[in-house]
Image (cartoon, grey):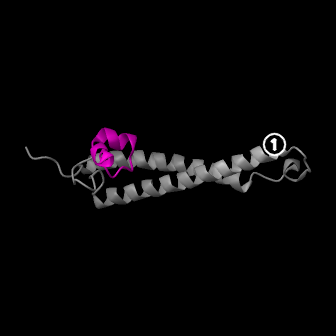
Amino acid sequence: MSEKNRYTDEELEEFKALILQKLEKAKKEFESLRADVMNSDGNDTADTSPTFKVLEEGASTLSKEEAGRFAQRQAQFIKHLQAALVRIENKTYGIDRITGKLIPKERLRAVPHATLCVDSKQK
């Protein structure tokens, strides 16, 4: 029996459902992080009251910077998931971009936007 060179349409649908689920969750997390950075939850007295607590202000700034970094990572993750959906539509999903062999299902379930199998990634 010859080795498969692509996943079946049914398998691709399974991966598509997984990716859509992760994409929805990632978008919600991104919006939450973006709200933290933009402080769009509202302007209460904590936003405008004078304060002399330098450490608290520093912690607040650090927290916003950290949320900004997380938001950037989340945006990148969303782009990778969207690219994976395009590969599903093109029926090239799950194919190692270096070797041309199928990436194991276990890896794709763990990292659905993967374009390399573990061996290729380690090289």
Nearest the camera: 9 or 72? 72
56 over 38 or under it: above or below:
above
**Is residue 113 highlighted in magenta?**
yes
Left/right placement of residue 119 relative to residue 78 reads: left
| Numbered marks: total | 1
Density class for disc 1 (Cα within 10 Å; few <14, some 14-19, many ≥20) is: few
Which segment did they paint magenta? 104-123
- State which quarter of the image contains the N terminus: top left
Q: Which residue is drawn at 88% across and 53% down?
A: 48
Nearest the camera: 114 or 40? 114
The x and y percentages for residue 35 are: 68, 53
Left/right placement of residue 123 relative to residue 5 reads: right
80 over 108 or under it: above or below:
below
Q: Which residue position holds label 1?
A: 55
Q: Quadrant of residue 97?
A: bottom left
**Is residue 115 highlighted in magenta?**
yes
Nearest the camera: 71 or 105? 71
The x and y percentages for residue 87 are: 33, 58
The x and y percentages for residue 7 are: 24, 49
The x and y percentages for residue 56 are: 81, 42
Residue type at mark 1 is Leu
